[in-house]
Image (cartoon, rainbow, N blue to C red):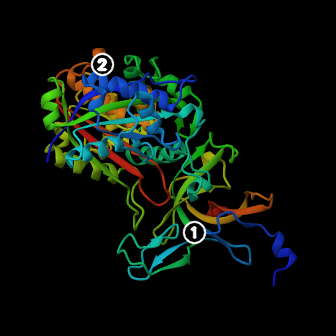
Amino acid sequence: MTGVYVIGVGMTQFGKHPDKDAADLGSAAFMEAVADAGIDPRQVEAAYCGHVFQGMVTGQRILAQVGLAGLPLSNVENACSSGATAIREASLAIRAGEHDVVVAVGTEHLTTKFRGALTPDSSDPEAAVGATMPGVYAMRARRYMEEFGMTRHQLALVAVKNKRNAAANPLAHFRKEITVEDVLQSRPIADPLRLHDCSPVTDGAAAVVLVSDRVAKKLGGGRAIRLAASTLFTGTVDVEPTTMTFEPLTQRTARAAYEKAGIGPEDVDFAEVHDCFSIAEVLRVEGLGLFEQGTYPGAVERGEADIGGRLPINPSGGLLGKGHPLGGTGVAQVVELVRQLRGEAGVRQIEGAKVGLAHCRGGKAVGIEGAACTVQVLVK
Amino acid sequence: MTTAQQDTAPKSFRPVEFELADDGQGFLLGSRCSNCSAHFYPVRQACSGCLHQDLETVRFSTTATLYTFSVVRQSTPDFEVPYALGYVDLPEGVRVMTQLTGRDPEDYELGMEMELIVEPFGVDEDGNEMAGFRFRPKEDS
């Protein structure tokens, strides 16, 4: 079976784009990725488009804008893992031998679709009693604080770190560093979480060009980065309630990725993880096995997750700082991984990085641990 | 059979998951696997433990333990904020999300014994009052 390589990446400015829609943003990212790959657009054989709230055939609207209408394309929805799922589907099409050059694009114009707290689908029994995503993560934060003694100050440091990284990322939604005091004085959203603990409502898109071994050798130009694993799982229905301070779903998805990539968590040099809320980053990195359960808040306090630290987490600024355009998020994470592994990350460059990991986890449905979880491992 | 009184009585806000008895008591509904006795909320079509498809719809206990909670201060227009939102664990081994009531937000504690009560829960499309469930600390009853 062929390997899969990323040979081109593109990403729009993340932020508010009142004058554009999801197809405009997706098209810009798509064309940038193809140009970055240095290929003729006619070499693209198929595409996958990840989005959540953008309506029917958003991907086809992108193809029409970029002059490639006619290609096989599937629109992919998996909540906040939609973009990452598009990458996985693209990689499977290549591994199956069906295509050699496939674009995965993720896009979302969220400012026109949602205000305030994101909620589960209205049909869900939990939505009916007032579930909000901040509320769910706030409940997990309270339980984690109780079980592991994490302080509110330590939790704030996650947001401070990610917004510091975002301030160094020209494409990030937020470009301003904040202090722990700023976090603790920001508007309460769902106790104990405050505004700076929550990812913003963001418009944006990202795209990657994935190719087979054969094409990577011919077209990669030495800049090809290997997609060593791309795994996806859905959460299970538990027969007994289990802890909400650890993520078996993230662990399962990561273990499958480590096995496919032939590595262990100790080999990961840096990671982009799904920090939709400050507490989410804590739960993700511990589920991924990058930090022992209960130890991440202390590690953040010691600077271990900083750029330049032992294991940088979310050097792009993460969802908290870079922004969270749902469909765009998972693809943008891989864009950051590729730029870091190529040595093109500018002031955010992690020296000597060889293995990067991206993690997404999205969606809420009653009675299951999480809707969709993805892990991508990229190797230089 | 139907009386005028019954016509005006509040109806369950989620009849598939929440049943109102004639005496006004409310019950969460779920599934019990007839093969392995695992319980699920809400009603399922197959058992996630043993994959048996012979599931019985049952009323759950109305007592529970508070696993965790938050006070939601930003929500959708359907809900007036703030409200306390929690997860409670039922004796059947299921965890259910619920609003909490009966205390100031700061006065709930993890591990508290809770009980289900029936409360007004919005109105339907025709403006009729609906009844839903919330959990309150048992010692307040």
The one nearer the camera, A262 or A290, is A262
Image quadrant where residue A42 sits: top left
**Residue appearing at x 63%, y 42% in the figure:** B75
**Can residue A253 be seen here?**
yes
Tell me the SS state at disc 1.
strand
Tell me the tag on residue A354: none
Task: Name the kind of residue labelled 1 in the image.
Answer: Thr
Residue A80, image x and y in percent?
43, 42
Residue under numbered circle 2: A348
Residue under numbered circle 1: B63
The one nearer the camera, A145 or A266, is A266
Task: Name the kind of residue labelled 2 in the image.
Answer: Arg
Tell me the SS state at disc 2.
helix
**Residue appearing at x 27%, y 48% in the figure:** A231
Neighbour tally class for label 1: few under 14, some 14-19, many 20 plus, Cα within 10 Å: some
Residue A349, image x and y in percent?
26, 19
In screen coordinates, is A139 left or right of B85? left
Image quadrant where residue B136 sits: bottom right
